[in-house]
Image: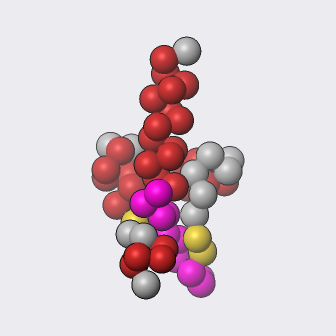
Amino acid sequence: MENFIGKLYSVSEVAELLNVDVKTVYLWQKEKKLPALKLGGSTWRIREQDLKLFILEAIEEGRK
């Protein structure tokens, strides 16, 4: 299944990777800047490809 969906990161893993607070990652989700999958209850996962795209877009935005 990993080949179809790719690697899934938890919100805390994304926060750690990007050196930001977990609340920031939830805010990005709420603002539709970072797509996430809700897997029931309060469990959210971010696909690796969505995270990569989010980072690339942030880099491009920073160059403007």
Question: Which quadrant, please, contains the N terminus?
Answer: bottom left
Question: Which quadrant, please, contains the C terminus?
Answer: top right
Give the magenta range.
Answer: 39-49
Query: Is residue 17 highlighted in magenta?
Result: no
Whether residue 23 is visible to the viewer of this picture, yes or no, is no
Point out residue 7 in the picture as x, y percentages from the top left corner. 38, 69
- Residue 35 in the image: above or below residue 38: above
Point out residue 37 in the picture as x, y percentages from the top left corner. 58, 70
Point out residue 20 in the picture as x, y percentages from the top left corner. 39, 44
Q: How many marks?
A: 0
Q: Which sits in the foreground, 4 or 39?
A: 4
Q: Residue at x 45, y 41 (%)?
A: 55
Query: Is residue 46 highlighted in magenta?
Result: yes
Q: Which sits in the foreground, 15 or 49?
A: 49
- Judged left or right of residue 31, residue 62 is left
Q: Residue at x 54, y 25 (%)?
A: 61
Q: Residue at x 59, y 84 (%)?
A: 40
Q: Residue at x 50, y 33 (%)?
A: 58
Q: Which sits in the foreground, 48 or 45?
A: 48
Toward which corner of the image does residue 18 lie, by quadrant? top left
- Residue reaching furthest front? 3
- Residue reaching furthest top? 64
